Structure formats: C-alpha cells, structure tokens
Image (spheres, rainbow, N blue to C red):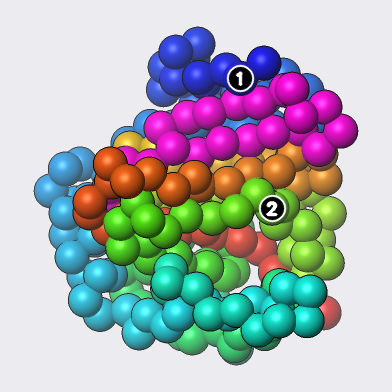
Amino acid sequence: MKTQASDLFGNDPAANLLPCDGTVNYFGPILSPAETARYYNILLTEIPWKHDEAVIFGKHIVTARKVAWYGDSDFSYTYSGTTKQALAWTPELATLRDLVGNLTSTVFNSCLLNLYHDGNEGMAWHSDDEKSLGKNSTIASVSLGAEREFRLKHKRQPELAVSVILESGSLLVMRDATQSHWLHCVPKSKKIKFPRINLTFRTMVTG
C-alpha cells in the first residue's frame, strides 16, 4: 500500500512518515523563498559539479546526474564501486550544515550534493548503508529548485511504501534503522523541466 505522506502529516517535523522499522521526518521548507533562491543560484553556478560514476555488474557507468562531495577533511567516500575525495566546505554549505544540524540535533561532517538537470534524471532504489556512515546513521536532505517526488519502500515488505513531494527549500531527515530496512528513490518524470539540487548531510565514521 502506497501512502502519500504529506496527505497524512502535512509538514509536521515530529511525525514519522514510516509505519515501522525506521524514522523519516519531513520538515517542509526551512528556508525563505529569497534564501532558497540565493542558495540555489550560488550552488548551481559555483559548485564544481561532475558526472557521477558507478560500477554495476562490472560495467563502468557515467550518469547524466552530477555530484559533488564536501567534508570537514578530505574524507574518501566509496559507493557503487567508485571513491570520491571530499572538498573543503564553502561558506554557503557550512551555513546550511549548521542550520540543519541545529534543527536535527546532529553533528554532520560531510555532504553529498546531487544535481538533477530535469525530470529525465532520477535516482534508482537504494539504501545509504555504507560502512563508512556507521549503523543507523542520520541523513538530512535539503532540496533546492524543482519539486521532486521521493519514494520509500520496505526491503522485505515492498507493499509498505511511502511517497512525499520535496518542496524547494525543504528538509527531509532519515534516521534510526531506516537504511537497514528501507529503500528510497527519486523517480524520473517528464513533467519536470527545471533543475533540482539535493544536499545530503551525513556523518562519516572517523578514527
């Protein structure tokens, strides 16, 4: 059964969108329209975006979607068979990191940015469960630009599914056992004609 989370909870950040085995909170917009536009324009033009790469079944894939990886130090982050080295925080990313950290009571030390040029680009079903993120880690997702649908489905009970529309300037947080029990994706949509920037703040395990 697929549930449109916003229909049930609105933008109540205390409400858990998941029925079991994890916690997902949708805060709705946390930035004013003016702040959202400013961050969107700066990040779109000043981030050194690069096409993402993955090794799937031994085949090297280069995606149309672009990414960038930032952190407190030059963390290496390996996923989908490729490794990235973190760049130093920009002033804008550091400000957003601190804002999101205060709202979620979490200390984030890194951020993976995604740039979807339009609805022809999406993200396939996956979990952010790499060992470098630790177990039951908190991931905070800030969306700027085009509104996109965000879907989750349970790994063992795929009939349990949740969907939410991520507004520009909004924050969604995945925490507790979510990555162990749920998959998430951003489906493609030909209706989307404009870019979306997604900032996923994370806490890499150090030491």
Per the rendering, the mark at residue 2 is 1
Per the rendering, the mark at residue 75 is none
Quarter of the view holding residue 2? top right
Residue at the extreme right: 156
Residue 161 spot, x, y in % from top left: 66, 26
Quarter of the view holding residue 27? top left
Q: Main secondary structure of the magenta part?
A: strand
Left or right of 41? Residue 79 is: right
Residue 96 spot, x, y in % from top left: 38, 58
Per the rendering, the mark at residue 126 is 2
- Between disc 1 and disc 2, whose residue precedes? 1
The quadrant of the image that shows the C terminus is bottom right
Which secondary structure, mark 2? strand
Crowd band around label 2 with a 10 angstrom C-alpha radius: few (<14), some (14–19), many (20+): some
| Residue appearing at x 53%, y 80% in the figure | 62
Above or below, 27 relative to 33: above
Amino acid on which disc 1 is placed: Lys
Residue at the extreme left: 34
Q: Nearer the viewer, residue 156 or 35?
A: 156
Q: Nearer the viewer, residue 93 or 4?
A: 4
The quadrant of the image that shows the N terminus is top right
Amino acid on which disc 2 is placed: His
Residue 189 spot, x, y in % from top left: 38, 44
Task: Decide if residue 68 is in sight here.
Answer: no
Task: Decide if residue 179 is in sight here.
Answer: yes
Label pair 1/2, CB-CB below 8 angstroms: no
Magenta span:
145-165
Left or right of 13? Residue 36 is: left
Above or below, 157 relative to 60: above
Residue 43 spot, x, y in % from top left: 28, 70
